[in-house]
Every structure is written in C-alpha cells, then in structure tokens.
Amino acid sequence: MKKYMLLYKGPTTASGASHKKWPAWFNKVGENLVDIGSPINNGFVLHSDGSKDNSATNFNGYSIIQAKNINAVKSLVKVHPFLSIGNGEYSVEIFELAR
C-alpha cells in the first residue's frame, strides 16, 4: 500500500474548537492510519540566503494514512470532520509519500 500525507489547511482554528468527531474518523480509517499526526503552528520560510519570513502556508496539522490508490484515499478523506468546519475555507492537501 502507498502512504499519503494529509495536510490540514485553513484559517487558525479557534482554541476552543471541538475535535469530538476526529476519534470516530480515526476509527473509521482503522489500520490505514499510519500516524495520527499533530497540530502544527508557527511555520516560517527559510530562504537559501539564510533569511526567514513568516509567509509559510497556513497548515493546521497533518496525518499520514495508507491506501491502495488515490480513489481509496479520496473515499477516506472526503468524510473527514476537518472538511465540515466553516464555509469551504478549510481543505485537506494530499501528497503521496515516496517511501
């Protein structure tokens, strides 16, 4: 099976935001969940000249799953509770991992 990184992208999630539906989604993914992941914040961009700026893409967190193909990934991710937040400004970016 191939592994895929899910990057949760959107505005900063409110500190009191509910994650009640996430455990049910993790359970649904079952053995295909490779790494539950973690929230991420305070990203920055490091340039080749050593300078840094705060223009990093606003990712909220990540998870890693495994699946037979991209259709299986889409089937798992389309019901992720993160996608039900807000009015379409939240999304999940999906990348196949080379190893």
Image (spheres, helix red, strand yellow):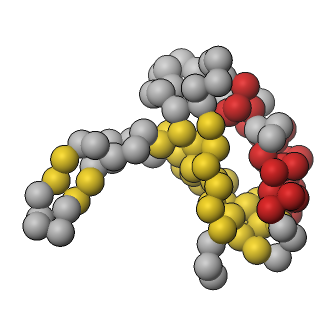
Residue 31 sits above or below residue 40 on the image: below
Q: Horizontally, is 79 left or right of 65 in the view?
A: right
Q: Quadrant location of the C terminus?
A: bottom right
Q: Horizontally, is 57 left or right of 38 in the view?
A: left
Please give the count of numbered marks on the rendered protein.
0
Residue in the foreground of this view, choosing between 33 and 93: 93
Q: Is residue 67 visible?
A: yes
Q: Position of residue 74 (x, y in %)?
A: 81, 51
Q: Quadrant location of the N terminus?
A: bottom right
Residue 42 in which image quadrant: top left
Q: Position of residue 66 (x, y in %)?
A: 77, 66
Q: Position of residue 45 (x, y in %)?
A: 26, 54
Residue in the foreground of this view, choosing between 80 and 57: 57
Residue 17 in which image quadrant: top right
Q: Horizontally, is 48 left or right of 69 in the view?
A: left
In percent of the image, x 87 and y 59: which residue is there? 72
Q: Is residue 35 visible?
A: no
In percent of the image, x 61 and y 49: which residue is there? 93
Q: Residue furthest bottom?
A: 99
Q: Position of residue 59 (x, y in %)?
A: 47, 43
Q: Horizontally, is 77 left or right of 19 in the view?
A: right
Residue in the foreground of this view, choosing between 74 and 21: 74
Residue 98 in which image quadrant: bottom right
In percent of the image, x 40 and y 44: which residue is there? 57
In percent of the image, x 80 and y 57: which residue is there? 73
